[in-house]
C-alpha cells in the first residue's frame, strides 16, 4: 500500500527536507514592485499560515520553540492574518498542494502588508504566485497526501528560523531526531509482529473504541496531530487535550456515567516535561480516570533532545493510525470529504480569483 511506503521512508524524507530547505536563499531586500519592498531580517514575531496537514508542522514547531525561540510564534489557520502582522513579521505560508484558499488568502494579505513571506509548497497556485513575485519558496516533492509529508512541512520551518537568526546550533538535534526515527521505523514496519511493534499494539488497543489523546506542554502539537491522523487516516472521530489545561475541563467530562465513558481509550503521550508538578499531574489524572476509561495506555518517547522525543511519539502514533485504518477496512490515503468541501467552496467563494487579482494589482 502506498501509504505504508510514505511512512516507511519518513526518516529519509526528513533528510531530504533538510537539504531542500538549506538550499533556500532568502534575499536581504526584495523589491516586489515599485511600491512594495520587503526587508528580510531577524523578525519580531513568526506566523505559520496553513490548514490541516500543512498547519500541523507549525504546532510542532511552536512546542519545540518554547524553550529556544525568543519571539512569539503563532499558527494561523484562517483566511486572514492578525492585525499586528507587518513588516517585522515573518510569515511562512505552508500549503502542500499550494491550492488551499484560506492559505492563499492569508498569504496575499501578508505580502500586501510587507511581511517577510516565505512559502513551503509542492506547487499549485502558491508556487506560481511566489515565482511571479520573487517570494522565497521551499519546493517540495509532489505526489504525497499532505499529512504524510510532515517531514517537508516541519524541517523547512526550522531551517527558515535558522536562516533568519532565530535559532542556532541545532544540527545535532536534527540529526539525532532522524537517527531515532530510523530506529522507530525498524520497529513499526509491517514485517515486525505485534508483540514487538508498538504501533500495531496501539492500533489493536484503539480498535472498537474512541481514542482520547492527551499530551503535555511539549506534546500539545503531537496530541493534536495524533487526533487528526486518526480522523484522516483511520476515518474515525477522536478527542485530544493537553496537560495542565485538561485538568481544568476534560476531567469533569470523565464524571459522565461509566456506560458512556467506557467507550473511550486514553492515550497519554509522555514527552519531555520532566517537571515534578507535571509528572505528578499526569499520574493523578491517570488515576482519576482509570476506572472510567475502557483502557489507558502510555506512549513513551525516545532520544535525548526535545525534537527526537516529540517526533518519536508522533511516528509511533502516526503509523498506528494507518494500522487502525487497515483494521477498519478503510483507505488511509483517501480524503473524499475534504476534497468535496474544497471544490464546493472554491466554486462559490471565488477567493482564489480574488487572490490572483490582488497579485496583478501589486505587480501593476
Ligand atoms: C492532510 C490533508 C488536509 C490538507 C488540508 C490543506 O493530508 O489532506 O488536512 O492538509 O486540506 O491542504 P494543503 O495541505 O494542500 O494546503
Image (cartoon, rainbow, N blue to C red):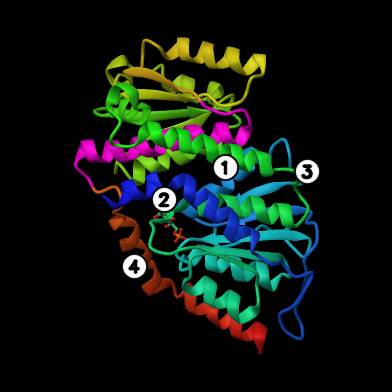
Which residue does the image show at 75% across and 63% down from the upper left? 86
* Circles 2 and 4: CB atoms closer than 8 Å: no
Vertical relation: 311 (above or below) 299 = below
State left or right for residue 192 relative to residue 16: left
Q: Pointer 2: what residue?
A: 148
Determine if the C-beta at disc 2 is less than 8 A from ligand 1.
yes
For marks 4 and 1 on the same chain, the one whose residue lies earlier in the sequence: 1
Q: What is the distance, in whole Å, between disc 3 and disc 1 at their CAs?
A: 16 Å
Q: Are marks 2 and 1 in contact (CB under 8 Å)?
A: no
Q: CA separation, marks 2 and 4?
A: 24 Å
Count of numbered tags: 4
Closer to the chain start, of discs 2 and 1, is 1
Q: Which of marks 3 and 4 is in front?
A: 3
- Which residues lie in the magenta part? 301-330
The CA span between labels 3 and 2 is 30 Å
Q: Earlier in the sequence, mark 3 or mark 1?
A: 1
Q: Can residue 223 be seen in this view?
A: no
Instruction: Please tell me which of labels 3 and 2 falls first in the chain.
Output: 3
Q: Position of residue 92 (x, y in %)?
A: 63, 59
Image height of 143 relative to 193, above or below: below
Residue ID at (73%, 46%): 72
Residue at mark 1: 60
Amino acid at each position: 500500500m502506498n501509504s505504508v511506503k510514505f511512512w516507511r521512508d519518513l526518516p529519509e524524507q526528513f533528510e531530504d527536507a533538510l537539504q531542500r530547505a538549506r538550499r533556500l536563499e532568502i534575499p536581504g531586500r526584495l523589491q516586489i514592485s515599485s511600491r512594495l519592498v520587503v526587508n528580510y531580517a531577524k523578525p519580531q514575531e513568526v506566523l505559520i499560515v496553513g490548514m490541516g496537514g500543512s498547519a500541523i508542522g507549525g504546532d510542532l514547531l511552536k512546542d519545540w520553540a518554547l524553550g529556544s525561540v525568543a519571539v512569539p510564534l503563532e499558527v494561523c489557520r484562517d483566511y486572514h492574518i492578525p492585525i499586528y502582522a507587518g513588516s517585522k513579521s515573518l510569515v511562512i505560508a505552508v500549503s502542500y498542494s499550494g491550492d488551499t484558499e484560506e492559505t492563499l488568502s492569508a498569504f496575499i494579505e501578508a505580502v500586501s502588508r510587507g511581511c517577510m513571506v516565505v512559502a513551503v509548497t509542492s506547487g499549485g497556485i502558491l508556487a506560481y504566485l511566489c515565482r511571479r513575485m520573487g517570494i522565497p519558496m521551499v519546493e517540495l516533492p509532489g505526489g504525497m497526501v499532505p499529512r504524510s509529508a510532515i517531514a517537508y512541512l516541519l524541517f523547512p520551518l526550522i531551517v527558515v528560523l535558522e536562516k533568519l537568526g532565530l535559532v542556532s546550533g541545532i544540527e545535532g538535534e536534527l540529526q539525532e531526531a532522524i537517527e531515532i526515527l530510523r530506529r522507530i521505523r525498524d520497529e513499526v514496519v509491517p514485517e515486525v509482529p505485534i508483540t514487538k511493534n508498538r504501533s500495531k499494539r496501539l492500533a489493536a488497543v484503539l480498535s472498537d473504541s474512541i481514542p482520547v489523546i492527551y499530551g503535555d506542554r511539549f506534546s500539545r502539537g503531537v496530541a493534536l496531530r495524533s487526533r487528526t491522523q486518526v480522523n484522516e487516516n483511520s476515518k474515525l472521530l477522536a478527542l485530544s487535550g493537553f496537560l495542565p489545561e485538561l485538568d481544568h475541563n476534560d476531567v469533569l467530562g470523565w464524571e459522565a456515567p461509566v456506560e458512556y465513558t467506557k467507550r473511550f481509550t486514553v492515550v497519554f503521550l509522555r514527552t519531555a516535561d520532566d517537571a515534578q508538578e507535571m509528572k505528578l499531574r499526569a499520574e493523578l489524572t491517570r488515576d482519576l480516570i482509570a476506572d472510567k476509561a475502557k483502557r489507558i495506555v502510555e506512549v513513551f518517547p525516545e532520544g535525548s533532545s526535545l525534537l527526537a522525543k516529540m517526533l518519536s511519539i508522533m511516528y509511533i502514533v502516526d503509523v498506528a493510525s494507518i494500522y487502525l485504518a487497515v483494521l477498519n477496512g478503510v483507505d488511509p490515503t483517501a480524503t473524499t470529504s475534504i476534497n468535496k468541501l474544497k471544490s464546493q467552496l472554491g466554486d462559490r467563494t471565488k477567493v482564489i480569483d480574488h487572490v490572483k487579482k490582488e497579485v496583478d494589482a501589486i505587480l501593476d
